[in-house]
Image (tube, grey):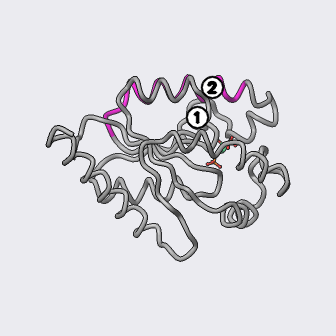
């Protein structure tokens, strides 16, 4: 496994980024970081609080700053992004510039929405189903720019998904060491 690059997990709210990143980090024996968690610790406020108090644009600035710091200052591990981070071109450029490999957890909208509801409405950008569905549709082409796409479904466990990603990363590494 190429140990020098950050592995970045993206996908819509409720696609399972944090739990899959944790599972993948365990399989690979690496550190796991959750960008929203980093933001909450450094800023003293959660993503939700920042968006509600200062607006989404202010949150995006903070998110980009923290993403940049994490990419520069942490040893290569597995990083779970918040659902909007990869949708900004400047953030994608930052990640690509640092040689990060991004994985899209492609989960059906209904599954994401069920999980958003279950989590008790902590997502200010997914206040109702219509708003969330629009955002989901709008963002799919941007998520699709990720290097690896992994299908998420209700019948796949976190472990199945993490193991599938670990295997796909091994195949990628083998291809690049074979000179493809
Ligand atoms: C956001 C997703 C959230 C959080 C913030 C904005 C988004 O993270 O970063 O509320 O724009 O999709 P999760 O994807 O972990 O819910």
Residue 160: quadrant of the picture: bottom left
Question: 10 Å neighbourhood of mark 2: few (<14), some, or many (≥20)?
Answer: some
The label number, if any, that marks residue 82 in the structure image = none
Q: Main secondary structure of the magenta part?
A: helix
- Residue at point 47% right, 46% down? 9
| Quadrant the C terminus occupies | top left
Give the mark, 1 or 2, whose residue is nearer the N terminus. 1
Q: Secondary structure at mark 2?
A: helix
Question: How packed is label 1: few (under 14 Cα within 10 Å), some, or many (20 or more)?
Answer: many
| Residue for badge 1 | 39
Name the residue at the bottom extreme. Answer: 155
Q: Which residues are magenta?
A: 58-76
Place of residue 44 in the rendered image (x, y in percent of width and height, measured from the top left): 64, 33
Asked whether the residues under the numbered discs 1 and 2 touch, taking CB atoms below 8 Å apart as contact, a structural biologist would say yes
Q: Quadrant of residue 114?
A: bottom right
Against 81, is 71 above or below? above
Residue under circle 2? 62
Ligand 1 within 8 Å of the CB at mark 1: yes
Above or below, 149 against 64 in this view is below
| Residue 22 horizontal/vertical position (percent) | 42, 56
Taking depth in this image into account, of 73 and 127 the one nearest to the observer is 127
Q: Residue at x 38, y 34 (%)?
A: 100
Of 19 and 46, which appears nearest the observer?
A: 19
């Amino acid at each position: 496994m190429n140990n020098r690059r950050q592995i970045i997990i993206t996908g819509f709210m409720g696609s399972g980024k944090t739990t899959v990143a944790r599972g993948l980090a365990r399989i690979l024996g690496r550190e796991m970081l959750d960008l929203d968690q980093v933001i909450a610790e450094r800023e003293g406020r959660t993503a939700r609080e920042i968006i509600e108090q200062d607006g989404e644009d202010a949150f995006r600035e903070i998110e980009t700053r923290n993403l940049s710091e994490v990419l520069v200052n942490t040893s290569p591990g597995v990083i779970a992004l918040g659902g909007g981070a990869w949708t900004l071109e400047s953030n994608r450029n930052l990640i690509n510039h640092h040689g990060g490999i991004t994985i899209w957890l492609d989960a059906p909208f209904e599954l994401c929405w069920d999980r958003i509801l279950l989590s008790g409405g902590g997502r200010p950008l997914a206040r109702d189903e219509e708003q969330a569905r629009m955002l989901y549709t709008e963002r799919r082409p941007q998520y699709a720019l990720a290097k690896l796409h992994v299908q998420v479904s209700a019948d796949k466990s976190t472990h199945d998904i993490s193991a599938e990603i670990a295997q796909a990363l091994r195949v990628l590494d083998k291809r690049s060491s074979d000179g493809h």
